[in-house]
């Protein structure tokens, strides 16, 4: 990829139990496109500062990822896009954290790009921002999305307004490409 996202700032919100490749691969792809990616979490490290979160790698715990900041200290206005990785554990923990839900809700309501993969849309459901949106997800989340007012479809990637959703790790190339394309056209681009 070239540097088409030079000057863009992207937040990834995650905590322990994120699906390993659903955080690391989009981050790698977005950084390769020139974006500055910040990992935000709800889990403080020693002294209340950001520490590390541990991924889930298909069937067991994976590698740790350094956290750049805490979601309750972050301002959605400082970012051009938000990425929500899946895994079952990660979004389930995030959706019961009031600061994470408030950050995600404010971000989604801003009109800026919000991208969720796999179970990541659980946090969007909790933030009550999916009503009327056409979305995809891991198949087991489809009833949750429908009950929250979304139109669920089984596709590799779905773009509906400022929302981008994908189903699973195999969709990451299309997911990352859709984020890059959406940001290139974004009216919410921050000055470089």
Image (tube, rainbow, N blue to C red):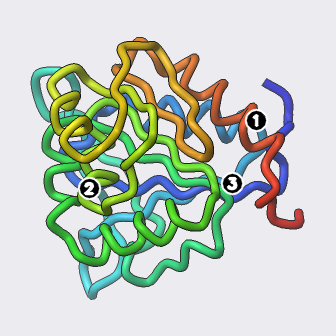
Residue at the limit of the structure toward the bottom, as seen here: 47
Tell me where residue 32 sits by quadrant.
top right
Q: Name the residue under label 2.
A: 15
Q: In this view, does 107 lie to the left or right of 81?
A: left
User: Does 5 sit above or below residue 155?
Assistant: below
Front residue (pair 184, 50) = 184
* Residue 36 disc label: 3
Front residue (pair 135, 138) = 135
User: Real-space Cα distance between discs 2 and 1?
Assistant: 24 Å
Q: How crowded is mark 2: few (under 14 residues within 10 Å), some or many (20 or more)?
A: many
User: Real-space Cα distance between discs 3 and 2?
Assistant: 19 Å
Residue 141 x/y as whole percent: 19, 31
Tell me the quarter of the image containing the N terminus: top right
Q: Mark 1 points at which residue?
A: 33
What residue is drawn where x is 85% and y is 29%? 2
User: In terms of secondary structure, where does tag 2 sit?
Assistant: loop
Q: In this view, does 77 lie to the left or right of 42?
A: right
């Amino acid at each position: 990829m070239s540097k088409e996202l030079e000057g863009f700032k992207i937040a990834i919100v995650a905590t322990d139990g994120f699906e390993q490749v659903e955080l690391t691969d989009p981050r790698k792809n977005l950084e390769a496109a020139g974006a500055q990616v910040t990992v935000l979490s709800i889990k403080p490290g020693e002294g209340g500062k950001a520490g590390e979160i541990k991924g889930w790698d298909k069937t067991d715990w994976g590698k740790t990822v350094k956290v750049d900041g805490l979601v309750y200290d972050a301002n959605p206005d400082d970012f051009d896009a938000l990425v929500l990785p899946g895994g079952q554990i990660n979004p389930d923990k995030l959706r019961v954290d009031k600061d994470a839900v408030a950050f995600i809700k404010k971000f989604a309501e801003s009109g800026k790009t919000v991208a969720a993969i796999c179970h990541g849309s659980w946090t969007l459901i909790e933030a009550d921002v999916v009503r009327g949106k056409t979305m995809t997800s891991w198949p087991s989340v489809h009833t949750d999305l429908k009950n929250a007012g979304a139109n669920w479809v089984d596709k590799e990637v779905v773009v509906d307004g400022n929302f981008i959703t994908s189903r699973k790790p195999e969709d990451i190339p299309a997911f990352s490409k859709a984020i890059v394309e959406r940001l290139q056209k974004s009216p919410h681009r921050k000055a470089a």
